[in-house]
């Protein structure tokens, strides 16, 4: 039974510490929409999304009013489009992006994910067509998000796909140059991608999923930071315990919303993703949590150790609070979306190499990082290869969401607005990796992939 102190504590978290449900995402399978006629496929995709998700926004708003819990985003994810569009040209495939955008607008959701491909071992003609269409698709839509999985621990790294994604990111940046190259903020490259992730831009509905599911992503960096602030003399073991207890409370709220949304919509409950997702608002920062642990500024020596503790404690606390934890689940470090990260990057304490080291122990990877607009495609591919290697060798999800901000240089800032925030343009190494990237082929799977 809930005690009055628990209720008052939760109200305080919501009112003063930025506690919210970051997203309720409905995953929808499009496998039954497959057709060799592009017109029929477009109609079937639109009709199914609108039929399944038409009541999503209103339902979430009713839940929010009833329980007093802010639900910030309502989203949809679908089967990777390359799976259902195997026989079409890039131009025809891009038409499906317009259909997704129109369906998302009709449903009132802010983003729809799944315009992507799984190419960790090779590419089909449909995969190639979709990847080639990404720049056009993201430049001509406002709600569509794209993800491409280029590696798994089991298969190794598809270096051909990594090389191509560098070119795709550059083209996307150019086509959306009038908006700060924002198209790249809706494009993420993965290793070991999860099939039930509710967070954008990497959300899609995996082929192993059912027809439809409700996945919820929680938040709460401000709550964790506040809890640590109230225990300034705690030793590091006590710090871990505080974080675990706090993550438990945050995840229980996510479980409540997920269960209620599932019941009202008549859709199976999928997972709760217990990631700490920051925002640009002051007091809602993962970097500030690390600084509460004793760092003068995020990015200095000790940052990776603090982040490892945070990520582990969040997973342990959250896993006790929900029967079905999935997605990414841990701590996010998106530079443009975290006020503390922005400040550390501006001051030069947080640099790209340090961020790469941090991704070895956090949930995702190099996320929402702006680099100079004249960064070469091969350098972008090399950054992707480095990050993806961390995921493959360590059997974890890693990802890259990099924005080569067209016309911007180191020291400039690019603004994306809303939850996407703003990012200082960070330097990259000047030395070339073009010969390495141009070798192509596939980097073999590591020894630890041989587990059968």
Image (cartoon, helix red, strand yellow):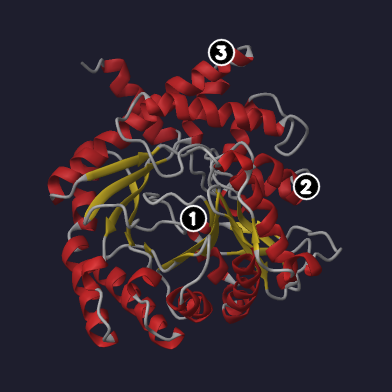
Q: Nearer the viewer, mark 3 or mark 1?
A: 3
Which residue in the structure is indicated by mark 3?
A: 238
Left or right of 131 in this view: 53: left
- The earlier-in-sequence mark between 3 and 2 is 3
- Looking at the image, which is closer to me, 212 or 216? 212
Residue lying furthest front in this view? 452
Q: Residue at x 27, y 80 (%)?
A: 42
- Looking at the image, which is closer to me, 173 or 64? 173
Q: Residue at x 55, y 41 (%)?
A: 450
Q: Are marks 3 and 2 in contact (CB under 8 Å)?
A: no
- Vertical placement of residue 323 versus 389, above or below: above
- Vertical placement of residue 267 versus 32, above or below: above
Evaluate whether residue 222 shows in this view: yes
Mark linked to residue 347? 2
Q: Residue at x 36, y 32 (%)?
A: 251
Q: Quarter of the image containing the N terminus?
A: top left
Left or right of 446 in this view: 250: left
Which residue in the structure is indicated by mark 1?
A: 419
Q: Residue at x 56, y 42 (%)?
A: 449
Q: Secondary structure at mark 3?
A: helix
Mark 2 is surrounded, within 10 Å at the Cα level, by few (under 14), some (14 to 19) or many (20 or more) other residues, namely: few
- The earlier-in-sequence mark between 3 and 1 is 3
Q: What separation in Å lies between label 2 and label 1 (alpha carbons)?
A: 22 Å
Q: Are marks 3 and 1 in contact (CB under 8 Å)?
A: no
- Vertical placement of residue 129 versus 306, above or below: below
Where in the figure is residue 187, as x and y percent of width and height? 52, 65
Q: Are marks 2 and 1 in contact (CB under 8 Å)?
A: no
Where in the figure is residue 384, as x and y percent of width and height? 66, 59
- Where residue 176 sits, quadrant-wise, is bottom right
- The earlier-in-sequence mark between 2 and 1 is 2
Q: What separation in Å lies between label 3 and label 1 (alpha carbons)?
A: 32 Å
Left or right of 114 in this view: 369: right
């Amino acid at each position: 039974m809930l005690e009055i102190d628990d209720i008052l504590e939760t109200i305080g978290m919501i009112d003063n510490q930025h506690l919210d449900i970051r997203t309720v995402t409905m995953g929808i399978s499009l496998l039954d929409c497959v057709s060799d006629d592009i017109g029929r496929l477009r109609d079937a995709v639109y009709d199914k999304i609108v039929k399944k998700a038409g009541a999503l926004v209103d339902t979430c708003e009713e839940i929010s009013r009833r329980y007093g819990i802010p639900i910030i985003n309502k989203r949809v994810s679908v089967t990777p489009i390359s799976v259902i569009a195997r026989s079409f040209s890039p131009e025809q495939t891009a038409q499906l992006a317009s259909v997704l955008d129109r369906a998302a607008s009709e449903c009132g959701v802010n983003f729809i994910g799944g315009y992507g491909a799984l190419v960790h071992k090779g590419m089909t003609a449909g995969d190639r067509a979709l990847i080639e269409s990404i720049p056009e698709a993201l430049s001509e839509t406002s709600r569509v998000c794209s993800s491409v999985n280029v590696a798994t621990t089991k298969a190794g790294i598809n270096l051909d796909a990594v090389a191509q994604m560098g070119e795709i990111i550059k083209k996307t940046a150019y086509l959306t140059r009038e908006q700060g190259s924002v198209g790249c903020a809706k494009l993420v490259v993965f290793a070991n991608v999860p099939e039930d992730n509710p967070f954008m831009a990497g959300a899609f509905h995996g082929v192993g999923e059912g027809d439809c599911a409700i996945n919820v992503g929680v938040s709460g960096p401000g709550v964790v930071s506040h809890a640590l602030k109230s225990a300034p003399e705690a030793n590091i073991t006590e710090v871990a315990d505080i974080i675990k207890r706090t993550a438990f409370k945050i995840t229980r709220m996510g479980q409540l919303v997920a269960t209620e949304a599932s019941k009202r919509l008549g859709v199976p409950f999928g997972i709760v993703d217990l990631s700490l997702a920051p925002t640009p608002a002051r007091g809602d920062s993962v970097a500030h949590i690390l600084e509460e642990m004793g760092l003068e500024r995020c990015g200095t020596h000790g940052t990776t150790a603090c982040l490892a503790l945070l990520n582990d404690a969040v997973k342990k606390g959250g896993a006790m609070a929900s029967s079905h934890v999935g997605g990414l689940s841990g701590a996010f470090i998106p530079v443009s979306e975290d006020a503390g990260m922005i400040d550390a990057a501006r001051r030069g304490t947080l640099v790209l190499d340090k961020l790469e080291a941090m991704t070895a122990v956090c949930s995702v990877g190099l996320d929402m990082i702006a680099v100079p607009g004249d960064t070469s495609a091969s350098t972008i591919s090399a950054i992707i290869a480095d990050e993806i290697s961390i995921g493959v060798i360590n059997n974890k999800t890693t990802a890259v969401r990099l924005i080569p901000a067209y016309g911007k240089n180191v020291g400039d800032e690019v603004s994306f607005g809303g939850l996407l925030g703003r990012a200082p343009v960070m330097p990259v190494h000047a030395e070339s990796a073009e010969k390495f990237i141009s070798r192509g082929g596939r980097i073999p799977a590591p020894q630890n992939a041989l587990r059968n």
